[in-house]
Image (spheres, rainbow, N blue to C red):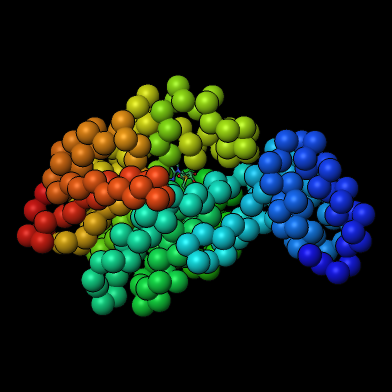
């Protein structure tokens, strides 16, 4: 906690957070106090949090996979389970991987991969200009705005060794069941994946073979109920398909691999 913030102000923050329903009011008050420069700023940050804004958006960062990711209001908060995509991506052998973080949001996945593989050439893209600005905060250059592959420079076609695509994959009917933090403070374009949640994924899978290098991989998070359909979409695109689980992270990823022969 910052020494400048008096104990009574912190105690009041805890009381307000608790009244707003924060289960970890003391811990959150500590994080908010750390982020606030003074008492007035702390009160403002607590006010935003009490209205349900995700803690990470309020303080402007999320700790993800060993890196601190800068966040802006309205940008998807990276989820702990997405570490699975980073782990798989960084397990691959390649001297200088060419990584694309498609549907990058804050750029958290690209940043975490670059942290683990500093030699990687990392590119990122998103359709949402706020997300693109946030990803530029985190990644610096090579961040593009546009609809899926349309955003990417032509020079990447056929060269991508790791295509991370943590697309929106919540089925439309399930959006009202999400926690209010997500429903009210993350854009629906970041969440809504259409009727079965796989609309954006299917487009990514069908476009992936043109952008992947031979042996290159596509990685996306999916739910248990989406497994069969996602595998089918990947095979339909001419890629080999695999599903990888991690019980601790409660995560499931689909991996599509382009044959070394490079044929679709
Ligand atoms: C579930 S969020 C994931 C963000 C980030 N990859 C992460 O894991 O933190 C999905 C992202 O996809 C973006 N998105 C949705 N539709 C898109 C499209 N057609 N083209 C590019 N990006 C899109 C959203 O703006 C959002 O940032």
- Is 122 left or right of 219, judged from the image as shown? right
- Is 226 left or right of 151, judged from the image as shown? left
Res. 62 image quadrant:
bottom right
Disc tally is 0
The residue lying at 75 percent from left, 51 percent from top is 26
The answer to whether one can see residue 233 in this image is: no
| Quadrant including the N terminus | bottom right
Percent position (x, y) of residue 221?
Answer: 36, 45
The residue lying at 47 percent from left, 62 percent from top is 65
72 or 252: which is nearer to us? 252
2 or 167: which is nearer to us? 2
The residue lying at 36 percent from left, 77 percent from top is 119
- Is 255 left or right of 264, judged from the image as shown? right
Percent position (x, y) of residue 53?
Answer: 68, 41
Residue found farthest to the top: 173
Above or below for 55 versus 192:
below
Above or below for 176 versus 155:
above
The answer to whether one can see residue 8 in this image is: yes
Percent position (x, y) of residue 110?
Answer: 43, 62
Percent position (x, y) of residue 230?
Answer: 25, 37
99 or 173: which is nearer to us? 173
The residue lying at 24 percent from left, 46 percent from top is 243
């Amino acid at each position: 906690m910052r020494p400048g913030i008096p104990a009574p102000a912190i105690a009041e923050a805890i009381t307000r957070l608790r009244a707003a329903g924060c289960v970890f009011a003391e811990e959150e008050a500590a994080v908010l106090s750390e982020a606030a420069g003074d008492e007035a700023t702390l009160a403002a940050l607590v006010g935003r949090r009490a209205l349900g804004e995700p803690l990470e958006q309020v303080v402007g960062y999320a700790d993800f996979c060993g890196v601190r990711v800068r966040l802006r209001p309205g940008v998807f908060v990276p989820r702990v389970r997405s570490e699975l995509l980073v782990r798989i991506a960084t397990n691959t052998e390649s001297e200088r991987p060419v990584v694309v973080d498609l549907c990058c949001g804050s750029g958290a996945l690209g940043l975490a991969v670059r942290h683990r593989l500093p030699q990687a050439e990392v590119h990122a893209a998103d359709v949402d200009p706020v997300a693109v600005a946030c990803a530029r905060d985190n990644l610096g250059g090579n961040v593009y705005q546009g609809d899926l592959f349309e955003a990417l420079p032509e020079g990447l076609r056929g060269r991508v060794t790791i295509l991370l695509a943590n697309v929106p994959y919540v089925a439309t009917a399930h959006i009202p069941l999400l926690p209010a933090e997500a429903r009210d403070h993350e854009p629906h374009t970041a969440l809504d994946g259409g009727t079965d949640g796989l609309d954006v994924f299917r487009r990514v899978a069908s476009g992936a073979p043109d952008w992947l290098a031979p042996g290159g991989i596509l990685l996306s998070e999916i739910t248990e109920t989406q497994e069969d359909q996602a595998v089918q979409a990947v095979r339909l695109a001419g890629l080999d398909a695999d599903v990888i689980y991690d019980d601790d992270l409660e995560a499931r990823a689909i991996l599509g691999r382009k044959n070394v022969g490079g044929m679709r």
